Amino acid sequence: MATEKDLLVSRIFCRAVLPVIKVMIEDDPKTRAKFANTRAVVQFVAKDHDGDVGAYLDFDNGAFTVGQGVAARADIAFRFPTVAKMNAMFAGKPVLPRIQGMWKVGLLMKVMGLLMGLKILMPNAKPKTPLQARLKVKMTLYMVSTALSQLNKGGYPDMVEWTAKQPERVYQWSVDGEDIACYLRVKAGKSQAGRGLYTRRKPIVHMKFSSIDNALPVLTNQVDTLQAMKTGLVTNDGSPEYGAQLGDLMLKVAQLVT
Amino acid sequence: MSSGGVTWNVYDADKLSQREIYGLVLCELGEKYPSIVGLSADLAQSTKIGAFGEKFPDRFFNFGIAEQNMMGVGAGLAKAGLIPFISTFSAFASMRACEFLRTDICYQNLNCKIIATHGGTSFGPAGTTHHATEDLSIVRALANLTVIVPADALETANAVRACMDIDGPVYIRIGRGFEPRVYESEDYGFEIGKAVEMHPGDDVTVIATGVTVLHAVQAAKILKEDDKLGVRVLNVHTIKPIDREAIIKAVLDTRRIVTFEDHNVIGGLGTTVADVIAESGKGCAFQKVGLPDEYTIIGYPEDILHYNKVDTDGIIEKVREIMGRDFEADENWEDEV
């Protein structure tokens, strides 16, 4: 039976990590071309005492969505005996799932390529090209903003306590000069992640990275936030106290998914 | 921006708080006016006047924890023809050293500039002893004193420069730093005693000062979108002399006035605006939004303001409330617009 932590981590993977595959499909020309004419559903599912846990990738001729739970039909299904093993595979650890639909070799190879691409999210993964660097920054920020919201929705005590007492507030991340921006909106225990710059109200904290290159050492924990601010890699506009708390919660996301 | 803080531009302002900006502008003015001297009461680092002290060590004086003495010496230096910039926390400038500010400086109409940092509840966790929620009430009653509350770092720069044009005492109330920017640049026509219209509207006017200006602008945008309300926002950065003309015009145009300040509702911006309206004889619905007449909770400034409904959500609630309120039209048939 999966522990509460296993379920929380799987929630992060299914609802925050898998959705950033969309960034690869939209922003990486080679990946986009690979999936331009693909129509398929790929399922990840783990057995649990209270029912199956998982999510599925839905490719529709270049469009991409992530569905939660078990799809009505799947072209390929990765089946895991436990939630913990599914989490381990998403975290990049060696796990052998049972794969249904292996005979669809072309699709399987393409999907494995995508899953390998997710490894760029690992803190120690060093991008080799400018495109990879951009993907890493964009995917990481998108993943973290959604993961924070999912931690709240999944009942992670620190996050629940953090959002419970806040009025409507927006925490924004962006990279100067790039089409990379996302936010976390909270209000009295509720939370919602979004993409782009939130315009309805000024963020209580706006973490602005001055460039992709400057964001990388911060997001890969090569420099701590204080040092990053001192050296101008990142500007934290807004409440310093809530900025620090946000930084702590971001670190907790990293600890959960690695 | 040079390390000495002599030159800087608006692009640097992203990184600069009101206090940082004050320190930098003072250095810039120090180059231009050799008669400027800096005075601190053991808070050079906290109030950022230390930047001036590093640049002009012979023109900088630290009095230790002796604010009254600092005010008295400042008066003496002004009598000798110098222009003292006296920096300390708002709570200390307006209360601990009040008699010296009044009798030594204001009574003699001396050319001293009081830079009062950590105004309102901006010193949050430091507690009630360091909150300045009565300072505007106190200092606006001091004759000869000009009182300015900038909305952000860029307006602080404008205020510090503009106060040099006044041959008399000026009290500039700024925050702890980290106040978000309201303006995009310094070039919006800052003038002491002249309010700035931050958002157009003819249904209701929100008159704000200091850190509440940003909240008022955000509320106006939300109310426009959600309630289809035209909310005029006036940034009354100068509490004394107040812009009577802009206030009366707002009364005549909108007939509903809400004042909005990080200060006790007694004696600050709201009371000043109420005085203007009462003296004018014009009728309107009127609501003061600020800190209640009690010592507030202690916490982060954002939380204190939210708790007391002195933030975007609070002003939205008050504007909706006042829109439902009736008011009696006056009998002055000449005030049509």
Image: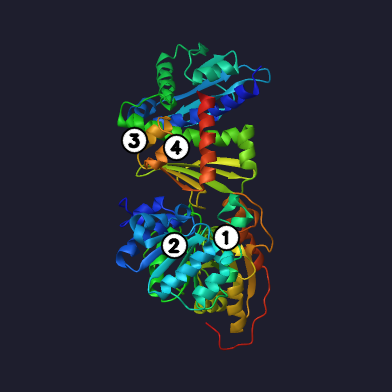
Residue identified by numbered label 3: A213
Instruction: Tell me the subunit letter for badge 4.
Output: A
Q: Indicate the position of residue A5 as horizontal and vertical percent values.
A: 62, 24
Q: Numbered disc 3: what chain?
A: A
Q: x, y (%) of residue B27?
A: 35, 60
Q: Is residue B297 left or right of residue A144?
A: right
Can you tell which of label 4 and label 2 is closer to the viewer? Answer: 2
Tag 4 residue: A225
Q: Are marks 2 and 3 in contact (CB under 8 Å)?
A: no
Between residue A52 and residue A131, name the one nearer to us: A131
Callout 2: chain:
B
Label 2 sits on a secondary structure element that is strand
Dot placed on the residue nearer the N-terminal end, 3 or 4: 3
Quadrant in which residue B188 is drawn: bottom left
Element type at mark 1:
loop
The answer to whether tags 2 and 3 share a subunit is no
User: Which disc number belongs to residue B120?
Assistant: 1
| Cα separation between marks 2 and 1 | 22 Å
Q: Is residue A127 above or below residue A145?
A: above
The percent position of residue B268, horizontal first and vertical second, equals 59, 69
Residue B39, numbered label: 2
Q: Nearer the viewer, residue A31 or B176?
A: B176
Q: Helix, strand, or loop for circle 3?
A: helix
Q: Residue at x 36, y 54 (%)?
A: B54
